[in-house]
Image: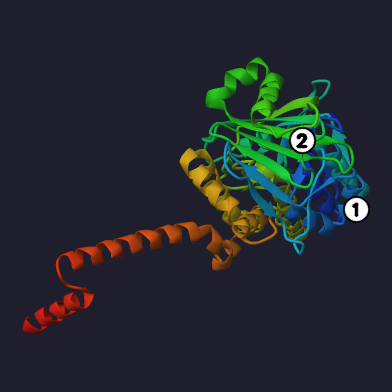
Amino acid sequence: MIGPAVPDVLVAGAGPAGSVTAMLLAREGWSVTLLERTRFPRPKACGECLNPGAVKLLAGLGLLERVRALDPAPIRGWRIEGPAGLPALGTFAPRVGLGLAVPRSRFDHALAAAAVVSGVVLEEGVRVEGAEPGGPGRLPTLAVRDRSGRTGKRRARVVVGADGLRSAVARAIGAHRRLPRLRKVSLTVRLRGTGPSRDRGRLALRDDRVLGLAPVHGHDPLWNATVVARTERFARAVARDARAFVTRSLEELGPEWREQPRITDGPWASGPFDWPTRSAVAAGILLVGDAAGYFDPLTGQGIYRALRSARLAARAVDRSLRNGEVSGKLHREYDRALSRAFGPGRRVQKIVEGVVANGCLRRAVLGRLARAPEAMDALIRVTGDAAPVRSLAGPGAWAPFLAPTLAAGARRSGARRGHERSRRREFGHDTSQVAGLAHDRRTHL
């Protein structure tokens, strides 16, 4: 079987989370082997947007110039629209910076190449099929299969599971708290076409589907189009002809184009989502990225969380190896760090999903956000991981959002007061007389 040597760290999956974890540990001097089931470059079902938080992390990792060399499209905010009414426009503030959008085939390849430059051994065409935690006198192990079908065991002092939504490592260590309840499938295609504004990503929200659209190249008219649909309604249509389903969704939900857009590649599928984990650690094993828990793709925070969890995991693994303790307390600290980093944002995601899934609530909230750009900006910055969730508690941004409710309440209150005055005049006394009568009664009592 390939790779007989026992490295310090074995990473399963060379997506952003796996490649960055491997790169950071190699920079610290540890021997790292990175396993990837396919060969680069390879496509990925994804919205392909790096929010401002992800861009900032890439800069801190020394990877931003490598990504900019791919000529990504700059994204300054999002346009969110329903079937009727004004769209809600959210903008990342100038101090926050821009987002970027780039094909995952090129982005993931660039990060894997950066890992190799740092000293990581990359083995492509190796599928991870299972895992066993370590124990007394026993190293954690991965069960693998290469392209020829040969199977084997791979061991290391620490194993990192970065193998995505359907993580074989997470499944093997019993990390999932339950099966997904949010039954959705996403289909991503590459489009070529001109027409829509290229400075923002777009989301079209409906009861049963969401269409996301974003440019993915700085100059060429290339787009990512991703349809997220509920499987209980569309499973058969997707299974019958996924490309036709995406084409129909683009026609029904998409913007106006100068010329009919052309699908040049895809579709690539992903889902179901909503994979909560009870823990992202086992003896000698840590999970990162989507493997460490996932809820819903709507807010586009997957790559940010992949990069941030990679930094947290690399720090935990480095400390474990230096202290000679590859399980126990230091691993539990990583688990807690994940909860602190992503718990508040995940709660926002669940609120967003609840609003989007309820037609009446979605229309009401979207209508308010369209008329309250400050509130929309505040929300976009939080989901862009450019502002903390607690920033939503500030009253300033939400005053315009709440103004229609407050005004309606004031109108209803004013109408009630006017009705009461009319009744008082009808019965021959005014407010001062009523107040005096009440005073007299209190005196006599």
Asked whether residue 7 is in view, the answer is yes
Judge by depth and name the residue closer to the eye, 320 or 180. Answer: 180
Quadrant the N terminus occupies: top right
Residue lying farthest to the top in this orientation: 240
Give the Cα separation between the discs numbered 1 and 2.
22 Å
- Between 260 and 18, the residue placed more toward the observer is 260
Regarding residue 3, the answer to whether it shows in the image is no
Above or below, 358 against 260 in this view is below
Relative horizontal placement of residue 40, taking residue 271 as reference (left or right): right
Vertical order, 73 against 330 (above or below)? above
Quadrant in the picture for the C terminus: bottom left
- The residue identified by callout 2 is 224
Numbered tag placed on residue 65 in the rendering: 1
Measured from the top left, where is residue 364 in percent x and y? 50, 46
Residue occupying the far left of the picture? 444
Using the rendered view, name the quadrant where residue 142 is placed.
top right
Neighbourhood count class around disc 2 (C-alpha, 10 Å): few under 14, some 14–19, many 20 upward? many
Q: Give percent across and percent down for residue 421.
A: 25, 67
The residue drawn where x is 17% and y is 64% is: 426
Which residue lies at the image location 64% right of the left edge and 15% below the top edge? 240
Identify which amino acid the numbered label 2 is placed on.
Asn
